[in-house]
Amino acid sequence: MLNHRKLAARALLAVVFWPSLFFFWFLGPFVLFLLSTTSSEVCPRLETRAEFLDAANGTIPMLLAQNLIYAVPIACLVLWGRISPEPARARHIVTCIKLFIAAAAIGALWEYGSSLACDGYGQPFFSPAWRMTGYLPIASLAVNIPLYVLVFSLGRAFSTREDDPTDGAVHPGETIS
């Protein structure tokens, strides 16, 4: 009975993991980037440093919400690791968590810097270092590609059945007694 519960819990996590991985990680960045940066229509109307700061700071709640949404697949991996503990997978999950934290920090810094620069309108008000955040997508790719590969492979490993599929199965030509 305990094995069935573990199998059911793993299946439930798979039902959450795969859609969240696809929608949040692969499609989400296109939508969430637009929601977590200062709108292009707002930028030309901002005139002072304080207005640019207010607009950029207004995106912080969305950045936090975005990172919580992105954490769903990582949380599934952690729960899978608790259900089926294996030292090798546990090390990979820790690596995923570290990569995720780095990716979240880089992404938040990039989006916040994009809000401050505000399509070039905010550049005179802030340090040139904030313009350098435009190069952070390159660093983000360097972190996200190994993260995506590792999370995908761990998700695949965790959502694959480990029990013997022939155990208790009825084969063709056999009768159930």
Image (spheres, rainbow, N blue to C red):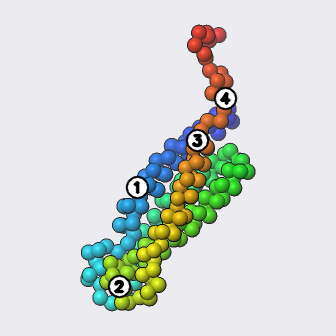
Report the amino acid beneath label 3: Ser
Instruction: Give the residue number, with chain letter if any, for mark 3.
Output: 159
Q: Is residue 26 left or right of residue 100?
A: left
The kind of residue on which mark 2 rests is: Gly
- As helix, strand or loop, the secondary structure at mark 3 comes to helix
Q: Quadrant of residue 30?
A: bottom left
Q: Which residue is mark 1?
A: 27
As measured in the structure, the alpha-carbon distance from the residue carrying label 2 to the one carrying label 1 is 29 Å
- Residue indicated by mark 2: 122
Residue 80, placed above or below residue 70: above
Dot placed on the residue nearer the N-terminal end, 1 or 3? 1
- How far, Cα to Cα, is label 4 from label 1? 36 Å
Q: Which mark is residue 16?
A: none
Q: Position of residue 158 (x, y in %)?
A: 61, 44
- Label 2 residue SS: loop
Do callouts 4 and 3 mark residues in contact (Cβ within 8 Å)? no
Any part of residue 5 in sight: no
Which comes sooner in the sequence, label 2 or label 1?
1
* Residue 134 pos. (x, y %): 42, 75
The reply to whether dot 1 and dot 3 touch (C-beta < 8 Å) is no
Q: Nearer the viewer, residue 84 or 94?
A: 94
* Real-space CA distance between mark 4 and mark 3, rounded to the nearest whole angstrom: 14 Å
Q: Residue at x 31, y 73 (%)?
A: 39
Q: Are marks 2 and 1 in contact (CB under 8 Å)?
A: no
Measuring from the top left, give residue 54's x and y in whole percent: 38, 82
Q: Residues within 10 Å of mark 2 (few under 14, many from 20)?
A: many
Residue 26 visible from this viewpoint: yes
